[in-house]
Image: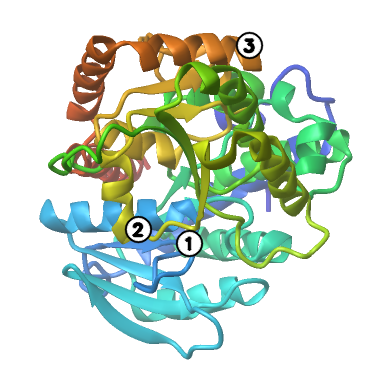
């Protein structure tokens, strides 16, 4: 049986790839999935598959324990879709050794069905046989399903799902630029240090995910550009849906004369918190009433030798000369985040590398807080005026500008409010539903042309 058609535009391969490269073989093999789908679709009965959306994702448990950022994102999205009237359910992780369970979270049915690692694909396949959704919407971060074994198992599940005619939408939360994939980043992240191998794995996984999805969602144009220009992917099925931001809570009363600069999130090298600490050391003497709050802890489950632990020790060494002008809070539970941001005067994002829309940045925008981003993050918000080149000296200058002026901070709050007005979760639900409808319309158009 001939499965490949040389004239099919879906077989286009970037010119920089070797003619018979592994990537090219993957691209060609993946086309056969779509070629076989009409038979799978024609065998389906419309009344067998109830309408609805299944979000496949890690999901918060409701306990005060650290969770991955994608879990909080998925919870906010699921709740917003539910409020919008969509029929949505969540296929979530089973914490620890728990057996499969079902719960309701703010009106959203949550089925805790999959185990991390090699089991994830089989667990998801089982529930897919029981609860065929109209749309399978999978949140993709490469390691949240249980490292490389979990990611490979998830890919196998997606491949099998597509062979049955299941419509699949993927949200890619991480899209790294090849120029940012350095040996230093890999080393400080505790990953194998071969840049060449890491680059190949990123390209291969991106091609596979693109071929296995009906539609792909990314959060900003910079990530779409990377997929198209660096990954060689067709742009038609790649959509931009902004990262949602929470609705601002009423501001708490000021806590005396104290002023706070905040760095928030897991303590990882790529977030550049050490740069912020070095910068604060330069300004602290001139602003004795200001404190730097480093809020967040280490990701759970790290080995004693993990580079993140060494990084935290380095941060404490940098902070030691500043005494009580620097505070390390450790992990901050979700319920405590509104107050944390309400009592913050300036938020810093000195990230060294951009490969995702920062969840902490979304919280700062939602809280309408003045914030400064690094040059690496500037492409997320091209019109945002408060940014710094990523040296301690430049950060010290940028911080002084906002720390000195109440008027300028008030202006930054108004500018953050403009950003937030188009990114609240109710709007994100509308944008996401538009992608769902496009997937349905595309399938109808394909079927009518056959």
- Whether residue 243 appears in this view of the structure is no
Identify the mark at residue 397; answer none if there is no mark.
none
Residue beneath disc 2: 334
Q: Position of residue 83 (x, y in %)?
A: 12, 55
- Whether residue 327 appears in this view of the structure is yes
| Residue reaching furthest to the bottom | 99
Q: Quadrant of the C terminus?
A: top left
Q: Position of residue 68 (x, y in %)?
A: 50, 57
Residue positioned 32% across, 29% down in the render? 345
Contact between marks 2 and 1 (CB within 8 A): the answer is: yes
Residue positioned 38% across, 17% down in the render? 403
The image quadrant that residue 197 belongs to is top right
Give the class, few, some or many, for how many residues have Cα within 10 Å of label 1's Cα (few <14, many ≥20). some
Identify the mark at residue 393; answer none if there is no mark.
3
Q: Nearer the viewer, residue 158 or 368?
A: 368
Residue beneath disc 1: 67
């Amino acid at each position: 049986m001939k499965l490949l058609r040389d004239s099919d535009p879906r077989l286009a391969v970037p010119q920089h790839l070797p003619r018979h490269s592994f990537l090219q073989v993957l691209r060609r093999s993946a086309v056969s999935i779509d070629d076989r789908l009409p038979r799978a679709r024609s065998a389906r009965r419309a009344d067998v598959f109830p309408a609805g959306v299944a979000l496949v994702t890690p999901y918060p448990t409701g306990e005060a324990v650290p969770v991955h950022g994608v879990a909080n994102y998925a919870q906010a999205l699921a709740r917003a879709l539910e409020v919008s009237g969509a029929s949505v359910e969540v296929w979530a992780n089973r914490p620890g050794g728990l057996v499969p369970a079902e719960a309701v979270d703010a009106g959203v049915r949550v089925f805790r069905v999959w185990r991390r690692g090699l089991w994830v694909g089989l667990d998801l396949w089982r529930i897919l046989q029981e609860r065929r959704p109209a749309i399978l919407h999978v949140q993709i971060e490469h390691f949240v399903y249980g490292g490389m074994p979990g990611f490979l198992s998830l890919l196998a599940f997606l491949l099998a799902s597509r062979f049955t005619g299941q419509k699949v939408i993927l949200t890619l939360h991480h899209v790294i630029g090849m120029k940012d994939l350095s040996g230093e980043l890999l080393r400080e992240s505790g990953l194998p240090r071969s840049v060449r191998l890491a680059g190949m794995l990123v390209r291969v996984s991106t091609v596979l995910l693109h071929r296995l999805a009906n539609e792909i969602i990314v959060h900003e144009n910079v990530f779409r550009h990377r997929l198209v220009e660096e990954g060689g992917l067709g742009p038609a099925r790649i959509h931009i849906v902004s990262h949602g931001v929470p609705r601002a809570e009423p501001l708490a009363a000021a806590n005396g004369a104290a002023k706070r600069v905040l760095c928030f999130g897991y303590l990882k090298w790529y977030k550049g918190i050490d740069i912020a600490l070095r910068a604060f050391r330069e300004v602290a003497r001139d602003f004795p009433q200001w404190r730097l709050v480093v809020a967040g802890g280490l990701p759970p489950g790290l080995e004693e030798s993990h580079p993140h632990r060494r990084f935290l020790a380095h941060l404490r060494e940098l902070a030691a000369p500043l005494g009580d002008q620097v505070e390390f809070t450790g992990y901050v539970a979700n319920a405590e985040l509104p107050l944390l941001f309400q009592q913050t005067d300036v938020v810093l994002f000195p990230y060294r590398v951009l490969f995702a829309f920062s969840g902490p940045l979304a919280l700062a925008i939602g809280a309408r807080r003045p914030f400064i981003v690094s040059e690496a993050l500037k492409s997320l918000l091209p019109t945002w005026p408060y940014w710094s080149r990523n040296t301690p000296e430049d950060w010290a200058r940028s911080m002084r500008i906002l720390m000195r002026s109440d008027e300028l901070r008030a202006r930054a709050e108004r500018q953050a409010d403009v950003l937030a007005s188009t990114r609240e979760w109710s709007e994100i639900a509308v944008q996401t539903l538009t992608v769902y409808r496009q997937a349905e319309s595309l399938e109808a158009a394909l079927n009518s042309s056959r």
